[in-house]
Image (cartoon, coloured by chain):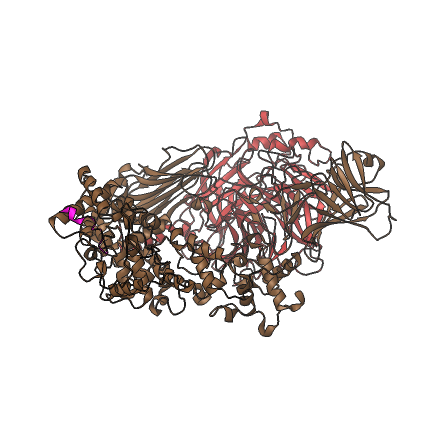
Amino acid sequence: MRNSLLILAGLLATVALAATGCDDAERLTSGIASPGVAAGKAPADDAAAWHAIADRACFACHVPADGRIPAGLEPLRAPAPEGIATRTDAGWMRRFILRPDTEKPGTPMPRLLPETPDGEETAEDLVHYLVSRGRAFEPLLFDLEPDAAARGATLYRDLGCFACHGPEFPRATLLAKTGPAELAAFLRAPLVHRPGGRMPDFGLSPEESTALAVHLLAPRLQGEALARATVLGRGLDYEYLEGEWDSLEGEFAETPARRRGIAPRPDLSRERRDDRFGFRFSGEIVIPGTGAWTLATRSDDGSRLWIDGELLVDNDGPHPAETKEAEIELAAGAHRIRVEFFENGGDEELQVLWRGPGETELRRVPDEAFRTARIRSAPEGHRPFVLDPERARRGAEHWKSLGCARCHEAESPVPPTRLPADDLTGRGCLSETPPTGAPRFGFAPGEAGEIARVLSERDENPTPGVELARHLARLDCTACHRRGARGPDEATLARFTGNGDWGDEGRLPPRLDGVGRKLTEAALTEVLVEGRKVRPRVNARMPRFGAGNVSGLAALLAATDLRPDDATEEPASDLAAVEAGRRLVGRDGFNCVECHSFAGHDLENRLTVDLAEAAARLRPAWMREVLLEPARTNPGTRMPGFFTGGRTGIPEVLDGDPERQAAAIRAYLRGGRDAIPPKGARIDRAAYELLPTDGPELFATFMRGLSARTVCVGFPERLHYAFDAGNARLARMWRGKFMNARGTWHGRAGALSEPGDRPVHDLPPGPALVESAAELASLPVAGRDAGWRMRGREVDADGTPVFVFARGDLEVRESLRPRREGERYVFVRRLEIRGLREASELRLARGRSITALGGGRFVVEGGLEIGGAEGAVVREVAGARELRRPVSASNPDAPVALVVEVTYSW
Amino acid sequence: MVMRSPLLAALAAALLVASLGAQTPPDESRSYRVDDLAIPPGIVLEVGGLLTRPDGSLMVCTRRGEVWRIVEPFGERPGFSRFAQGLSEPLGLLEREDGIYVTQRGELSRLRDRDGDGRCDAVDVICDDWSISGNYHEYLFGPCEDREGNLWVTANKPFGDEPFGRAPFRGWAYRITPEGVWQPVACGLRSPCGVATSPDGEIFYTDNQGEWCGASKLSHIAVGDFHGHPDGIDSCERPESLCPPPGFVAERDGGLLMPEVARRFPSFKLPAVWFPYDKMGQSPSGLAWDRTEGRFGPFAGQIFVGDQHHASVMRVALERVRGHWQGACFPFREGLSCGVIRVAFAADGSLVCGLSNRGWGSKGRTPWGVQRIVFTGETPFEIREMRVRSAGFRLEFTDEVDPESVRPEAFRMKSYTYRLHEPYGSPEVDGKTLKVDAARAVGPAAIEIDVKGLRRGYVHELAVSGLRDRKGRPLLHDKAYYTLIELP
């Protein structure tokens, strides 16, 4: 009999899909881009038919008469066989293979087997075969966090699950077939299990996927059902951590676990290092009798103990073994307990103690009192499965002969059949009574006719617009996004959540109208392939559909939306334009930073789309338009216009020319995340990475190789220097990152710091100015030993520091500031010298070789260039060469200072 | 069964709150309220120094090297502006006519705003004659000004690495003359986190228990003092020193009881007050005299001392006996949100507290911040003052005492002292329980107790029970710790 189910070659349709493990029924019954199908009506238009053709995978079994599958109608791959059995109850699987449409209403899987004893045998064989390709479903133990269901419900709403699955997920099928741990695993990697992308990957964290699974299986995880599913074991869950903390506040909470396990009691008798480690214990504590209980920790260093989520004992901080206790009224029975502990250095200890009502002494809580509850939740009627290899072998044959692989695997041993070139209406599997052996899809009234109509039209060279529309229908893009007349209905739109401050832009998935003109192909690809989230205030998350399923979509969008006259070239730009753009974006310009984050800087976590990504994401023509006319270019945007009536509010920049200003903004933003942040960017100054933006930042530190009295000065232009106040001299210059302050600001600190970037150019050790004949000839001693002392420092009007130091009457005021010179910034070093009595020399640089370039320019080995050093000479001093600029003694009593300016660049 | 009922959970939570509340003395907050200062995101106010100004504004210098000006600090939206940046762990501020003086690790500096735009535009070096080794613990505290216009600062001793070479004069007090001359004047300090001038121009400092510091203390400093830590003694031989070598030899003399050290080494300075460990904080910090003339409650003229570990403020009442400043300390207010580093009285009579617990954990819920303690107007029933008599003590209270409750049994006393030795801290040693022979009211709010066996160089710990005021209230704090150095 089973042989009769072999392919009948020559029939229009042969076979199609086989058993799946997941949840098409829920989705389809809740209605998406093909609502007609779900509601049991005929597809309303081509789009619904395109969706059905992809979903039913027509072209998994067939090829058109000319051999080319129409672009955009490629079949969606059915679930991969490897994981199906692992997450699906075997009994349910057998029923589904026999009667897919009744077990899972709306599934694209057709009936392939007769409802006869033979059919049932075949289905059972296929179940064994699928188990042999993975393992049998046996629900795993998992931890039920008390608020998981509520978090899952919130996620279901916030992520936008309702757009495909409806506001209430229809749970019946899931409840009958899988377990929470298995469902969570599926949700974490849906594309592995369903490569077709019908269920896309939302990049869920383990916590999120678990919470969603708990929400979806909620009826099995509450009340009586939960009590039945709860498995209790001795001990507490623990997490072992390594790190250095002074307290359980702050960083401790963010430190990830290095190891997890179950501990018989919260103490330190498990594998760990001697110092700088921590533990987190959680589970339940069973209180023997109702009354006032005292709980305590004794610890070295800090510990804390929570009961039922409330902090009870706070024994935090670094300290020798100390006992802290607190009393609480507790009902007899189990209560949630959590204990945290850290050890910094020295001895360590941790005990949890209690004292019952009427007792006088604290004593160790006995091991029996600790337990952890876990959940093992299986569908009703679940029974352990025993694999029969003989059945599995037979199942493998059915798998082959039924052509299951055509839909479920990348390659199938059964070749596709060619569709006839004429009208397909009512033929083969599209007929009302399909021939024996043909798959029975159970089409909705009219659906088969629509599929036949669309397939018979044979539009095999569609315009990009049609091809794009097919893709959008196939992947259900318009379940969430609006494009033209398509998109979610008002009720669905109303369900999306976000931050009200930003209106619909901060809540709804963006419109796709003209998106191919707005975004670069790279940006579109990033969103489509990587699920890149761009709008931080929109809660809905763009999922990944699988690279193979969206390939070419970005190009199609561009081909459809781009206008022939769109400029594709970048406007010309130079450092001056970049500076102007930075000014316009910042607080002293259009103040874009009031609403937009920059390169991830978003101090209060409240801003919208990141400016540093704008130039890479937006095409030049669209960006120009949106800057000049935001409301017309991006309908519904809250972005205000900055060039009302063709005039700019900032006339002093670029002659107030709107076109040039828009081009300058783009020129600046093309610097991306590496651009100097605009003034007013919401930078977290609590962070250790120092990032000057609004002006020079000063940072006092112990610097390796200099002294414990070093002041580092960083400029937004990314030029920085270190001034050694201990020896009253300019010591080092570098470019790029300024400083990381962690070693100076974290904990007790006191670490020696290093410049934040390389290369570092050292100035000659010793004083900058040498006067006496003896000093001129030898390598000077350290500034302090040579009599130089700091007088202090001043701050110029623009915030630039001026260091003042002196030896007796001889006083020097020294400053460095960046200056734009061509396409780069150079340091201008300015020295004002007063009270010079002898002919002296300024020591500008030191190195093994120094080359004169002419015109007062020199280059030192290592690439440091000195400019403006007219009259400087190279001297051999103590084994190296020094570039020195002679300065002549002025009238020491004259109030006018001698001023020397040179530039440094590299 | 797991308590999953929300009702039970709520009940448990309510009970929990009640029981947590019971951990702090119930009534401190009735008389002294604590207010938070709202700090905008992105500003890290790890307070190192605190300046209260006549217009109600604050200047705060931070361990990250900034100085912030805060106008209407306890209003709804305090105005923050950065006055200065790039200072090296500034830990104290002092306002004088010519600018704001600040201690940095390597220098005493003056901050000036020459153009009056609200931002510092000159950082003048006043004195930088000492050296620092690059050890993290070499903090510099102060300055405060004496009667002659000298500025005093106290310098921590290092612990561990000294990457730029060992520095002399660590664990010293320095005096800087109006001409900017550096004078290292007293040695033997350990971790002198607070230094301040009394209303009559004397300099006092607090020190933290540890090696060679048997218990945390408040001490008077004078030129030539040795305060007990031997590490800096060798600098006494240097030409700059104004402190003669005390003669103390760590290897030989370590382990002596404090009064014995004082007998053998005349320049060894016994404290004004020892703060018994954990009973009275663990890390005393900044101190301030109450010059509010009653606006801060009934303790005018007394000293308020912060504690970094306990996130608390303690109270000290001193008297001068045979030339030595000594007196008692009392618990005052717990429950600040973080370790207290600095205290300063504001123009409105509240006590502003600057907080940080970086590097040294503290009680409380935040890593840094500013709070203030405000007298609510409800005078607590407290021992206001404790003075030594040749035959006992005189106690003065903040309110009239119920004569019925004045009985000798209401007073228990013990005395103990500490060792001067290298191990961390000293236990209370040579303890003795003293008999209170008599207790009599000597005024509506004063009691004399007669105690036999008072000992010089010992803490006299008093515990009171059953005493009530005329309203029937018991004492808010029933302990006092009198450090008896001299007998009248």
Instruction: Return the x and y of residue B481 as percentages of the image width and height.
Output: 50, 43
Quadrant of residue B57 within the rendered picture: bottom right
Instruction: Return the x and y of residue A66 as percentages of the image width and height.
Output: 33, 57
Q: Which is more toward the observer, A124 or A696?
A: A124
> Which range is magenta?
A1-12
Residue at 39% across / 51% down in the picture?
A548
Above or below, A668 against A271 in this view is below
Q: Which is more toward the observer, B475 or A517?
A: A517
Q: Which is more toward the observer, A280 or B284?
A: A280
Is A7 one of the magenta-colored residues? yes
Dominant secondary structure, magenta: loop
Quadrant of residue B254 within the rendered picture: top right
Above or below, A175 against B155 in this view is below
| Chain identifier matching the brown colour in the rendered picture | A
The answer to whether any part of residue B55 appears in the image is no
Above or below, A390 against A402 in this view is above
- The reply, left or right, for residue B217 in relation to residue A193 is right
Q: Chain B shown in which color?
A: red
